[in-house]
């Protein structure tokens, strides 16, 4: 299996060295040429644009949200490298990505973790700066590799069948360090297990694009299925698990004009843990709606979005509900300078009816909530040819617990040749000023034929 995965990861690099030959006839190195070759091959997760103009490109990289890891596409492509001009190679394209990055947990996750520690271990107040710093000191570290193989007719691009293999190593996405009620000179010991998750995902997605009858509006529909195997191993048994997951996803967009687009998304998965000593099958669903509007000159975009997700942990009646609302405004000042500002509100409720803590006897129902508001501001500037300088400043504040309020700074460089290669490298720092903690993280992302 390791040899096969290594082969899948290295195979696209072979095609990179021949990308300038006619084998990649469907890929143009310029945005205008790219649009000309693929007028109907627009992914619905990308802002709309007008034929003949460079596609609108957000200056910030798409981040993976571990609370809803499969809520959006793994990554966005134009078409990939078409493997040849003759049958059967002309019907296939290939693309590749590698991402290695760190990121902090969102504020609502920290708040819910802190509250859970308090009722799990009632002999601990968990209210000092040192307690909270033990939560923020470790970022989530991810190594992710993806290969995408698409099948489509180069003459008619209304439909495409896409297969994606995605592998992830995830470190640190765990319950924070706490004192347990067993052992030690004072009856307690410190839990220091370090969680390492391995996710292997295989996805098949059917993409279809056409005009709505009579109305003439652009319409795009995506329907897919993803099978995931996930496991975690560490020195102890606290975080170990093995899980199979079946995910069903769909999304659609309708665009009456170049300045307006409606987007909707729904995703559901059901999991099973064969290693559990009882029937444990968590499930999750998320739905989202989004409206994408652009000004008359197409230089300013307005994107409100609302999403709702629910996690259930059968056979228990425990639930986690999460609602997110955001409003993004973007503007292209000129061909070199663009910026976006996003206002966000997140509200999470954890309802654990079957909780048996702290002594694991009779059920002890617990209801917790966490909410925060924040802004994300991004700017990018073309400093030379295809090289872009990126920067940003974020602010997040909890509405029911202020200990994890923070200010974030971001800086990076991006080399972007549309359809051929994209490389991003950068740094992010978060200052949790109320608990006097600072978290520094880095990221590296490589996209080939995207």
Image (cartoon, helix red, strand yellow):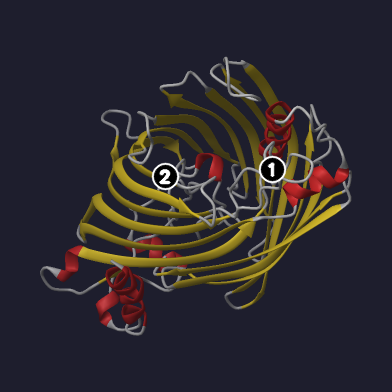
Closer to the eye: label 2 or 1 = 1
- Cα–Cα gap, marks 2 and 1: 55 Å
- Residue 169, how many percent across, how many down? 48, 59
Residue 207, placed above or below residue 439: above
The residue sitting at the left extreme is 87
Direction from residue 241 to residue 181 in the image, left or right = right
Q: Nearer the viewer, residue 79 or 314?
A: 314
- Residue 365 drawn above or below residue 35: above
Residue at the (34%, 36%) spot, across then down? 272
Neighbour tally class for label 1: few under 14, some 14-19, many 20 plus, Cα within 10 Å = few
Disc 2 crowd, CA 10 A, few/some/many (<14, 14-19, 20+)? many
Which quadrant of the view contains residue 365?
A: top right
Name the residue beneath numbered marker 2: 44
Element at label 1: loop
**Dots 2, 1 in contact, CB < 8 A:** no
Q: Secondary structure at mark 2?
A: loop
Left or right for 161, reference 447? left
Residue 310 in the image, given as x and y percentages of width and height: 50, 26
- Residue 228 screen position, x and y as percent: 34, 47
* Quadrant position of the N terminus in the picture: bottom left
Residue at x-position 41% and y-position 30%: 283
């Amino acid at each position: 299996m390791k040899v096969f995965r290594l082969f899948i990861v290295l195979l696209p690099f072979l095609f990179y060295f021949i990308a300038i030959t006619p084998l990649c006839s469907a890929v143009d190195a310029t945005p205008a040429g790219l649009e000309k070759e693929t007028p109907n091959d627009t992914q619905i997760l990308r802002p709309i644009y007008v034929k003949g103009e460079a596609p609108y490109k957000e200056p910030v990289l798409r981040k993976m949200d571990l609370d809803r890891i499969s809520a959006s596409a793994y990554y966005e492509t134009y078409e990939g490298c078409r493997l040849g001009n003759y049958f059967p190679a002309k019907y296939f394209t290939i693309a590749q990505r590698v991402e290695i990055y760190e990121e902090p947990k969102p504020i609502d996750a920290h708040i819910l973790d802190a509250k859970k520690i308090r009722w799990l271990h009632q002999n601990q107040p968990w209210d000092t700066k040192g307690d909270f710093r033990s939560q923020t000191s470790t970022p989530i570290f991810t190594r992710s590799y993806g290969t995408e193989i698409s099948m489509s007719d180069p003459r008619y691009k209304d439909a495409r069948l896409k297969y994606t293999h995605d592998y992830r190593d995830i470190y640190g996405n765990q319950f924070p360090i706490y004192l347990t009620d067993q052992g030690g000179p004072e009856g307690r010991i410190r839990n220091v297990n370090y969680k390492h998750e391995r996710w292997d995902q295989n996805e098949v997605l059917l993409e279809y694009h056409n005009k709505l009858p009579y109305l003439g509006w652009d319409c795009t529909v995506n329907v897919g299925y993803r099978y995931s195997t996930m496991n975690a191993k560490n020195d102890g048994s606290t975080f170990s698990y093995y899980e199979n997951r079946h995910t069903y996803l769909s999304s659609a967009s309708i665009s009456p004009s170049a300045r307006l687009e409606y987007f909707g998304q729904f995703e559901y998965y059901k999991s099973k843990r064969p290693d559990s000593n009882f029937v444990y099958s968590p499930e999750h669903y998320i739905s989202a709606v989004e409206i994408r509007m652009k000004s008359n000159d197409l230089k300013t975009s307005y994107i409100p979005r609302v999403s709702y997700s629910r996690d259930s942990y059968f056979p228990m009646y425990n639930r986690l509900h999460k609602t997110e609302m955001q409003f993004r405004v973007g503007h292209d000042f000129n061909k070199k300078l663009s910026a976006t500002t996003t206002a966000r509100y997140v509200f999470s409720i954890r309802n654990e009816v079957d909780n048996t803590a702290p002594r694991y006897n009779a059920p002890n129902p617990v209801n917790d909530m966490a909410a925060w508001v924040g802004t994300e501001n991004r700017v990018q500037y073309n400093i030379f040819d295809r090289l872009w300088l990126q920067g940003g400043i974020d602010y997040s504040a909890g509405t029911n617990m202020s200990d994890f309020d923070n200010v974030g700074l971001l800086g990076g460089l991006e080399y972007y040749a549309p359809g051929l290669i994209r490389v991003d490298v950068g740094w992010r720092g978060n200052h949790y000023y109320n608990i006097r903690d600072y978290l520094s993280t880095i990221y590296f992302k490589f996209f080939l034929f995207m």
